């Protein structure tokens, strides 16, 4: 999202007019969600959105203007998919402004149909073919999505299980963990060929409202929609041969920020499977260095069981505090034991 757009919407929020502020939040979310597929709305859409926020035109007039604009100026070979970004943004803004919602498979399908009608030929239709999608966060690997043969049954089963689930007595953390599990399962089914993440995001926002989360911080969907998608990906991908496990922790961090106004760091690079490997390698390297130093201190003590911490620090060119800490670690590991006083005693080597 462009900085000018963000600045303009923030200006509406600072003005303090409730109606304009609410509309600005809706448009921020609607436009921000296009980032899940790398799309960016046009300047015309942004100008039209501003007119809607100012109260000059209705959301229905916004949609009509966008439709007429692309009839008058059709885009051929639109690789940037600007028309899609504009039309879907307007439709999301419309849906988020509505106060209606039914928790059902039909509602989920309806959201997809309304978002992508006349954009995707299969809008609102459950796919009848299998799919794979290369993901940046997986280094171009793909999540294993539900097979076409089992889609409808799996989809309906997840809804039925969620309907039966009771949130009574759960802590806030337990509620968030359950929501993360439900929404990651729902997304993994991927019942549509395209547009699953945006559909899931709109469904989740409206479901959260139904559950009573009226003040959901939807700025997160505006500013971190790609993180939301990547978190869903990481919740549904594993490669045990490489030590990569499914994890909902990133999605839980997102939802905690969304619902509890926590301040977890939301950085896409930290979810990348190679980043995880890098951190593990770095940790292993640090541990190896620590072990090497400990072994060296241990070797000196084995050579001279009356050596002092001061002598160790001088021999290894480390600070006295570091030498004492290394000796303490060796004691805690059960490798050495002090016999007698600090001045006249000695180190007993404990055979492992």
Image (spheres, rainbow, N blue to C red):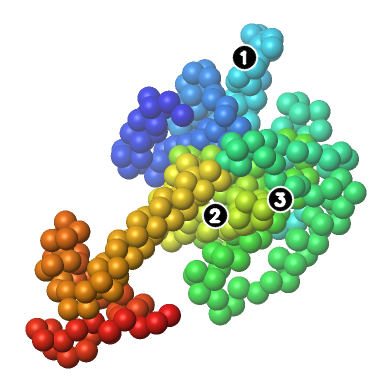
Q: On the image, numbered disc 2 is attached to which residue?
A: 251
Residue drawn at point x = 61 percent, y = 53 percent:
244
Query: Could you give the CA–CA distance between mark 3 and mark 2, rounded to whole angstroms?
Result: 13 Å
Q: Is residue 207 above or below residue 136?
A: below
As helix, strand or loop, the secondary structure at mark 3 comes to helix
Q: On the image, numbered disc 3 is attached to which residue?
A: 188
The answer to the question of whether label 3 and label 2 lie on touching residues, with beta carbons closer than 8 A, is: no
Give the tally of numbered discs.
3
Query: Could you give the CA–CA distance between mark 2 and mark 1, rounded to whole angstroms?
Result: 38 Å
Looking at marks 3 and 2 on the same chain, the residue that comes earlier in the sequence is marked by 3
For label 3, count other residues whose C-alpha is less than 10 Å away and answer few (under 14), some (14-19) or many (20+).
many
Instruction: Tell me residue 196's x, y (percent).
Output: 69, 41
Instruction: Tell me residue 277's x, y (percent).
Output: 51, 48
The quarter of the picture where residue 186 lies is: bottom right
Q: On the image, numbered disc 1 is attached to which residue?
A: 69
Q: Looking at this rendering, what residue extends furthest in the bottom direction?
A: 340
Residue drawn at point x = 23 percent, y = 85 percent:
338
Q: Is residue 71 above or below residue 92?
A: above
Looking at marks 1 and 3 on the same chain, the residue that comes earlier in the sequence is marked by 1
């Amino acid at each position: 999202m462009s900085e000018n757009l963000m600045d303009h919407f923030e200006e509406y929020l600072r003005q303090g007019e409730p109606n304009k502020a609410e509309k600005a939040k809706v448009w921020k979310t609607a436009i921000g969600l296009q980032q899940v597929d790398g799309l960016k709305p046009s300047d015309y859409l942004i100008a039209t959105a501003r007119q809607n926020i100012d109260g000059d035109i209705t959301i229905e007039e916004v949609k009509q203007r966008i439709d007429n604009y692309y009839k008058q100026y059709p885009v051929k070979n639109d690789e940037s998919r600007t028309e899609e970004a504009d039309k879907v943004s307007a439709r999301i803004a419309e849906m988020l402004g509505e106060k209606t919602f039914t928790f059902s498979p039909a509602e989920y399908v309806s959201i997809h149909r309304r978002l992508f009608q006349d954009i995707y030929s299969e809008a609102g239709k459950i796919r009848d073919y299998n799919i794979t999608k290369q993901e940046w966060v997986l280094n171009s690997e793909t999540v294993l999505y539900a097979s076409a043969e089992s889609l409808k049954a799996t989809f309906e089963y997840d809804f039925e299980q969620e309907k039966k689930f009771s949130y009574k007595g759960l802590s806030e953390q337990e509620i968030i963990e359950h929501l993360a599990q439900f929404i990651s399962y729902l997304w993994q089914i991927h019942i549509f060929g395209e547009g699953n993440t945006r559909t899931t995001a709109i469904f989740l926002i409206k479901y959260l409202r139904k559950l009573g989360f009226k003040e959901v911080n939807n700025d997160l969907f505006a500013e971190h929609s790609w993180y939301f998608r990547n978190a869903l990906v990481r919740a549904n991908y594993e490669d045990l041969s490489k030590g990569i496990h499914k994890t909902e922790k990133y999605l839980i961090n997102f939802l905690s920020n969304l619902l509890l106004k926590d301040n977890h760091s939301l950085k896409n690079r930290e979810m990348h499977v190679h980043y995880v490997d890098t951190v593990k390698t770095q940790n292993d390297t640090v541990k190896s260095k620590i072990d090497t130093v400990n072994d060296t201190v241990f070797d000196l003590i084995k050579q001279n069981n009356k050596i002092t911490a001061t002598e160790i620090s001088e021999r290894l060119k480390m600070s006295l505090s570091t030498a004492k800490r290394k000796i303490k670690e060796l004691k805690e590991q059960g490798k050495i034991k002090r016999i007698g006083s600090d001045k006249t005693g000695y180190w007993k080597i404990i055979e492992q």
